[in-house]
Amino acid sequence: MASISITLRSFFLLQFVFFLGLVSGPNSAWAASLHRVPRVTTSKLSVGNGVDLAFIDSGAPTSFSKSTPYTTIFAIHGEGYYSPVFQKIVAYAPLANIRFVAVTRRDYNGSTALTTDQISVLASGTDDQKASYLVDRSTEIATFIDTFVTQNSIPAPTSNGQYGGFAILGWSLGNAFAISTVSNVQSYSSAIQTRFSTYLRALILQEPPSVAIGTGPLPAQTYTPQIDTSIPADLQQPAFIQWITAYFDHGDISSKDPNVLSYVLPSISRPPSVFNMSAAQLAGMTNNGPANGSDGLLIANVQTQLLASYKKALYDNATRAAVPNMKVTEIVGDATAEFGIVAYWSILDDNDAAGGDKVEFKVLHGANHFVHWDNPEIAIATYAASLQ
């Protein structure tokens, strides 16, 4: 592992040197264009019990009509990166007749921090306490959605189910919370249950890792800088923040063979997404504190509850009946880090076992874990297609 890690860090260094040359050399105008991202304003919404959730909002499209009202997508971010990672989607969404609202999870910038007791549940709680933790976080997100819909007069779905209403999108570890928001729908107030029953049109799973849905064990070859002991402990998460944005040269992923995956070494076919971010942009959408804290504890200690939540949201007939208009789509890039592909295989198998009609799948050729940053036009088109 040590020799591999040294090679990987050397690879990163060479890439940084090369792309720093691009930024400061004759291609500096090209580099500057990559950083032209619209500024977004963060707002907050109270969900009760002294809890605020921050969010960014594209606003309502100005060109929609009464016959084709816009659809609202509520997005939930992953580990390390929080809601501003979707800022390019905010610019593209109105062009697709979509209002895009990216919600910041508890513990991340702008939203209310988790309490000491809540962190203790993640660290050493009972199984019931961990399940209740997911219910509580899901209730907060569901309350956010219901309140936002009411305050902003979000259009109801049309009679043909093609327009209006809302979707919930999870990206990366955020899928744990997107899925839980659906799996716990029958625990919400009657008003929220009614809202979800009529308004919820889609659950979009953008590259959930296995640790977001509890479908371990992982392949023996699994790698991430977060578990690489040859990297100093205080640099493991910052290394992950950069490494996860890379592209990877895998073999034929339709084979479902773990041996065709590239686990460690990024591809040189395309620069990692981090090279398309300025230092200010990267700092403005990352927070290593929760990644090392509450998210790490969730990954380490709540897998049993996450698996139960995933199974209930996607395959339980009573839950699906409670949200009868909800379509489920899983999106994965074939050049993403291996964990997204391994989870994709698990969902494929589980869907087949459930009859093959619970989940639709979209594989994006050449896409990595940050398609919403590197190719926002492809991302928003894929989200829009997931609504149909």
Image (cartoon, grey):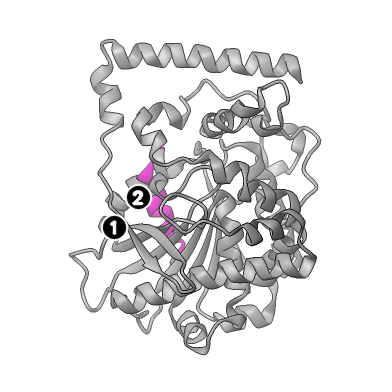
The residue lying at 65 percent from left, 54 percent from top is 212
Query: Taking 306 as reference, is 80 left or right?
Result: left
Quadrant housing the N terminus: top right
The residue lying at 66 percent from left, 36 percent from top is 252
Q: Nearer the viewer, residue 9 or 157?
A: 9
Q: Main secondary structure of the magenta part?
A: helix
- Amino acid under disc 2: Ile
Quadrant of residue 101 within the rendered picture = bottom left
The residue lying at 67 percent from left, 53 percent from top is 298
Q: Nearer the viewer, residue 36 or 331?
A: 36
As for residue 383 lying within the magenta part, the answer is: yes
Q: Secondary structure at mark 2?
A: helix
Q: Position of residue 10 (x, y in %)?
A: 59, 12
Residue ID for mark 1: 58
Query: Is residue 358 placed above or below 241 in the rendered structure?
Result: below
Q: Nearer the viewer, mark 1 or mark 2?
A: 1
Kindly tell me whether residue 235 is visible in this rendering.
yes
Query: Is residue 330 placed above or below 85 in the rendered structure?
Result: below
Residue stretch in magenta: 374-386
- Amino acid under disc 1: Ser
Query: Is residue 107 placed above or below 333 in the rendered structure?
Result: below
Q: Label 2 near label 1: C-beta < 8 Å?
A: yes
Residue ID for mark 2: 89
Measured in 3D between alpha carbons, the distance from the residue under mark 1 to the one under mark 2, in whole angstroms, is: 8 Å
